């Protein structure tokens, strides 16, 4: 995708640009993501088949309506499903590591296409391997940041709970309801704002560590400065909220469809197939949005549209 007009975009233009980029680079994006996601989903089916079987069992419970004995048998089978928790934890840890490798590769692929150059799938994964450890450090750094910013939010939550308890003890019903509503809304708003900003700042750092510097500490510092720059704070919050809605809320109907299909057909493999395919699409769209947003930040803060008029530098 030859990008001939790198300029600051509005919020709607960012999403439109990301969708266009995703569609135009659909095949290489799907291949890069599938190389990691398909093996992970297959491994999940082996390590934790219960995640799908529970829906098959639920389907059998409903199918046995009117037959109490069959319903009890199906319900007992569902209650006896238990996985190996140690294996599941190990799989989750392994999955995070693989996805960080995949993320570096997909960012390298999309970023090069967006700035007018081409990166092959093999080269994208070579970049991913070179940036794997720095990407892990960036993820760990923002996990620590998330833990730190959670402290004042926990304090705010406790203050709201104490205020509600105090007004309830005084038997002030109207005041209790008012404090609960105002405090609850305020807490949820603070939670959304803080974690949306942290989430988007992390995405900026993950982009920076692939395209600009292999030093993860420098990448984190650069991302934080860009996220806190004048005029960028609320855009960072909104960007994080958009990614959350696409990646997390968008996954809910996907899981629902997979669950319904599995319950109706009793085919456990269908659950993993639907979730895997949907994950590839959602991850690709999120990656395209992150690249477009990160480039937009550089255009706004650093005049990168002027810099990009020259041949774009190769990703190190």
Image: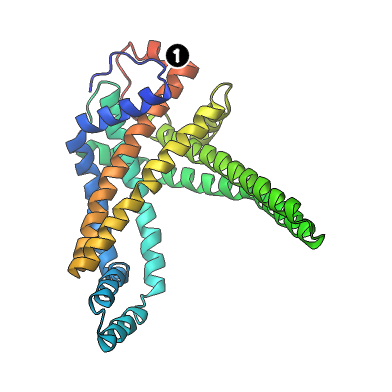
Q: From what the image shows, is residue 21 above or below residue 52?
A: above
Identify the residue at the far bottom of this view.
69
Q: What crowding class fits label 1: few (fewer than 14 Cα within 10 Å), some (14-19), or many (20 or more)?
A: some
- The reply, left or right, for residue 226 in relation to residue 68 is right
Using the image as rendered, state which of residue 24 and residue 267 is in the foreground.
267
> Looking at the picture, how far across and down is residue 37, in whole percent?
26, 52
> Looking at the picture, how far across and down is residue 305, in whole percent?
38, 13
Residue name at image x 53 percent, y 25 percent = 232
Q: From what the image shows, is residue 250 above or below residue 264?
A: above
| Res. 180 in view | yes
Residue name at image x 27 percent, y 74 percent = 62
> Looking at the picture, how far across and down is residue 122, in whole percent?
20, 39
Residue name at image x 38 percent, y 25 percent = 12
Q: Quadrant of residue 76?
A: bottom left
Give the labeled residue for mark 1: 303
> Looking at the picture, how far across and down is residue 81, in whole percent?
34, 78
Q: From what the image shows, is residue 121 above or below residue 262?
A: above
Q: Secondary structure at mark 1?
A: loop
- The reply, left or right, for residue 9 in relation to residue 225 is left
Residue name at image x 39 percent, y 65 percent = 90
Query: How many tags in the picture?
Result: 1
Q: Which quadrant holds the C terminus?
A: top left
Identify the residue at the far right of this view.
170
Using the image as rendered, state which of residue 299 and residue 139 is in the foreground.
299
């Amino acid at each position: 995708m030859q990008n001939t007009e790198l300029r600051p975009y509005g919020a709607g233009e960012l999403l439109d640009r990301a969708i266009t980029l995703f569609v135009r680079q659909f095949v290489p994006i799907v291949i890069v993501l599938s190389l990691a996601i398909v093996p992970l989903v297959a491994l999940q089916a082996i390590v934790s088949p219960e995640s799908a079987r529970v829906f098959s069992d639920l389907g059998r419970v409903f199918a046995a309506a009117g037959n109490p004995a069959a319903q009890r048998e199906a319900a007992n089978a569902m209650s006896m499903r238990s996985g190996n928790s140690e294996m599941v934890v190990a799989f989750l840890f392994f999955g995070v590591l693989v996805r960080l490798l995949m993320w570096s590769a997909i960012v390298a692929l999309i970023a090069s296409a967006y700035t007018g150059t081409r990166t092959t799938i093999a080269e994208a994964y070579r970049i991913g391997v070179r940036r794997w450890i720095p990407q892990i450090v960036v993820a760990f750094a923002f996990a620590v940041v998330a833990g730190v910013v959670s402290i004042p939010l926990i304090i705010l939550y406790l203050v709201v709970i104490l205020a509600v308890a105090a007004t309830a003890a005084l038997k002030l019903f109207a005041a209790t309801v008012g404090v609960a509503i105002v405090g609850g809304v305020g807490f949820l708003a603070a939670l959304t704002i803080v974690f949306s900003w942290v989430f988007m700042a992390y995405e900026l750092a993950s982009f920076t560590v692939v395209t600009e510097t292999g030093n993860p500490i420098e990448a984190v510092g650069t991302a934080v400065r860009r996220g806190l720059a004048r005029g960028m704070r609320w855009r960072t919050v909104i960007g994080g909220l958009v990614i959350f809605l696409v990646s997390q809320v968008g996954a809910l109907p996907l899981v629902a469809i997979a669950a319904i299909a599995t319950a109706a057909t009793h085919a456990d493999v269908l659950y993993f197939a639907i979730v895997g395919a949907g994950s590839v699409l959602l991850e690709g769209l999120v990656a395209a949005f992150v690249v477009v947003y990160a480039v937009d930040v550089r255009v706004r803060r650093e005049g990168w549209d002027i810099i990009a008029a020259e041949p774009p530098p190769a990703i190190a």
